[in-house]
Amino acid sequence: MSLFHFRPRRSVQRRKFIFLGMFAPAVAPRPANPRPPEPHAHPVPPPANPLQASRTRRIFDAHLHCPSDDGTVWQWHPVTRTFDEFAAYLDRTGVQRGIINSVRSQLAKDAAGFIAGNREVARRAEKSKGRFLPACVVNPLLIDEALREMEDCRRKYGMVWVGELCNYTVPYQYTIKEFELLVEQAVKLNMALDVHTELDEMQYVIEKFPRATLVFPHFGDSNEYRNIFKRIDLIAAHPNTYLDTSGYGHDRVGVLEYAVDKIGPGRILFGSDFSINDPATVIARVEHAFLTEDQRERILAGNLEALLKKVAA
């Protein structure tokens, strides 16, 4: 999830982040602690038309929020209100496959709400014949229902992905005992857990749950310049973790290259955060990045395919 949603304890930070980008001067501010250049050279990307290139590549999106059957959609000004419009826009950008979670589940305040949303994406995925894979979203504050729902999603509907979990929409803290039980269930069921975090939350979750398969969306957080490299370095140090390209940070030239240098090309997943953010912007950055063709292909699809095989085993 991106900055479209506001977490109460940092809502002012988020609004500032959004509007600073709109009214920034021609010369962008430098990071507070810029990294020194790496000693080795990166491969120079060939001239590319990202839209044309996306037609010939496999592109598998790890981070999609699909509209609910009741018309609820996460978009600043709704333009893809239905699932058909959602899928058609992905066609335009070149995204062939994706992991979908329901906005209804994300916003649910009771178990019936997140269960209904999970059933929506299960039906959508079944009709798509493999194009979309469903993800399970639950609320740890309703822990008994959440644990049962995770098992039902895994056993009955074949879901291997939990999340994206966004604790500020409910809200709750990742330090609560109920969240620990939820993670233990994900480990038991061999499901990947996708968790939206600030830097301090990311560090806590990584250190607390070394046995979990953890996916973290976004290179940056509310303090992008201060934390973006720290987040990447944290992922690099923990082989059970993955980072997706969605939201904010991917557009800063050099950040994706730094992530590949530090994490390696095998644990970076293509993610867009659509229907909030545009997949084409992420595709363009990957296509123009100072990466090898193999690295591009792994980020755009291969790494997510490998991760899904791992958790589906």
Image: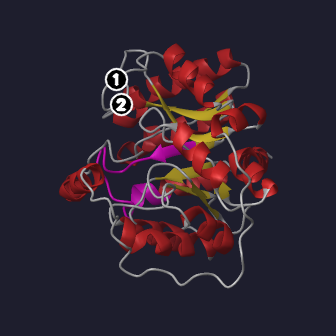
- Which residue matches tag 1? 78
Dot 2 amino acid type? Gln
**175 within the magenta span:** yes
Contact between labelled residues 1 and 2, with CB atoms less than 8 Å apart: yes
Real-space Cα separation, disc 2 to disc 1, in angstroms: 5 Å
Using the rendered view, name the quadrant where residue 276 is placed.
top left
Residue, disc 2: 75
- Would residue 238 be seen by someone viewing this image from the given angle? no
Residue visible at 50% across and 16% down in the picture: 85
**Few, some or many residues within 10 Å of mark 1 (<14, 14–19, 20+):** few
Using the image, determine if residue 16 lies above or below residue 98. Answer: below
Q: Is residue 10 above or below residue 121?
A: below
Q: Is residue 77 left or right of residue 288?
A: left
Secondary structure, mark 1, is loop
- Specify the amino acid type for callout 1: Pro
Q: Is residue 197 above or below residue 158?
A: below
* SS state under label 2: loop
Residue 126 in picture, x, y percent from top left:
67, 19
Direction from residue 35 to residue 113 in the image, left or right: left
Nearer to the camera, 285 or 107:
285
Q: Is residue 301 magenta?
A: no
Which region is colored magenta? Answer: 162-180
Residue drawn at point x = 44 percent, y = 37 percent: 145
Q: Is residue 92 visible?
A: yes
Decide which of 53, 71 is in the foreground and name it.
53
Residue 84: percent from left, percent from top: 53, 14
In x, y percent, where is residue 120? 51, 21
| Quarter in which the N terminus is drawn | top left
